[in-house]
């Protein structure tokens, strides 16, 4: 019923969680992605560059399952500062385009590795 998903093309989890989990092959739950690159470094010091890396990590997870951003049905964006919303939203739109999943955006006090943005997704498999 639950399958742990993993790809070498996105950063490995930095804690006791999975990159993604599939339930009966139809719903996939992607853990929150932060701006880590494959070398384990934070990509950029502003929210736009970090959002690009987060979306590249999500794209790697999607590609590993032969899916695209159009399969994302719900995302949750965690921002360190809601004043960064417009910059994050602009980059987010480049990746999600017309697929427009349901989304929540939340300002939080702190994120792992002190990044500025984290995005988690629920994805409909095929």
Image (spheres, rainbow, N blue to C red):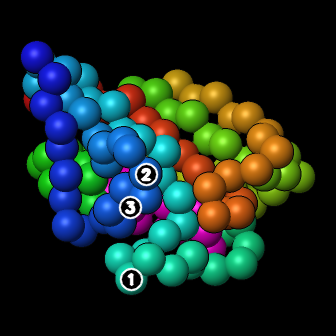
Residue placed most toward the observer, 98 or 32: 32
Q: Which residue is mark 2?
A: 15
The secondary element bearing badge 3 is classed as helix
CA distance for labels 1 and 2: 16 Å
Label 1: state its secondary structure: loop
Q: Nearer the viewer, residue 57 or 71?
A: 57
**Can you tell which mark lies on residue 94?**
none
As drawn, the residue found furthest toward the right would be: 83
Point out the residue furthest to the front here.
16
Determine whether, in the image, residue 124 is placed left or right of residue 78: left
Residue at x-position 76% and y-position 50%: 110
Hey, which quadrant is residue 16 in on the image? top left
Q: Residues within 10 Å of mark 1 (few under 14, many from 20)?
A: few
Q: Position of residue 18 (x, y in %)?
A: 31, 43
Q: Is residue 86 magenta?
A: no
- Tell me: residue 2, above or below residue 10: above
Q: N-terminal of the two: label 1 or label 2?
A: 2
Q: Compute the Cα span from label 3 to label 2.
A: 16 Å
Res 39 label = 1
Task: Measuring from the top left, give residue 90's x and y in whole percent.
Answer: 66, 57
Quick check: 79 left or right of 43? right
Q: Please indicate, yes or no, whether residue 94 appears anywhere in the rendered image.
A: no
Residue at horizontal 57%, vertical 76%? 42
Percent x, y for residue 23?
19, 21
Residue 62 in view, yes or no: yes
Point out the stretch of residues depicted in magenta.
49-59
Question: Which of 116/100 is in front?
Answer: 116
Verify whether residue 51 appears in magenta. Answer: yes
Q: In this figure, which residue is indicated by the disc labeled 3?
A: 57
């Amino acid at each position: 019923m639950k399958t742990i998903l993993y790809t070498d093309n996105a950063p490995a989890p930095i804690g006791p969680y999975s990159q993604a989990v599939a339930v009966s092959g139809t719903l996939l739950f992607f853990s929150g992605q932060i701006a880590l690159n494959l070398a384990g470094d934070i990509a950029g010091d502003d929210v736009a560059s970090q959002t690009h890396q987060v979306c590249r990590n999500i794209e790697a997870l999607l590609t590993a399952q032969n899916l695209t951003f159009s399969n994302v049905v719900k995302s949750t964006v965690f921002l360190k500062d809601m004043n960064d919303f417009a910059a994050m939203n602009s980059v987010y739109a480049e990746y999600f385009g017309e697929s427009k999943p349901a989304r929540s955006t939340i300002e939080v006090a702190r994120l792992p590795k002190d990044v500025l943005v984290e995005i988690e997704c629920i994805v409909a498999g095929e």
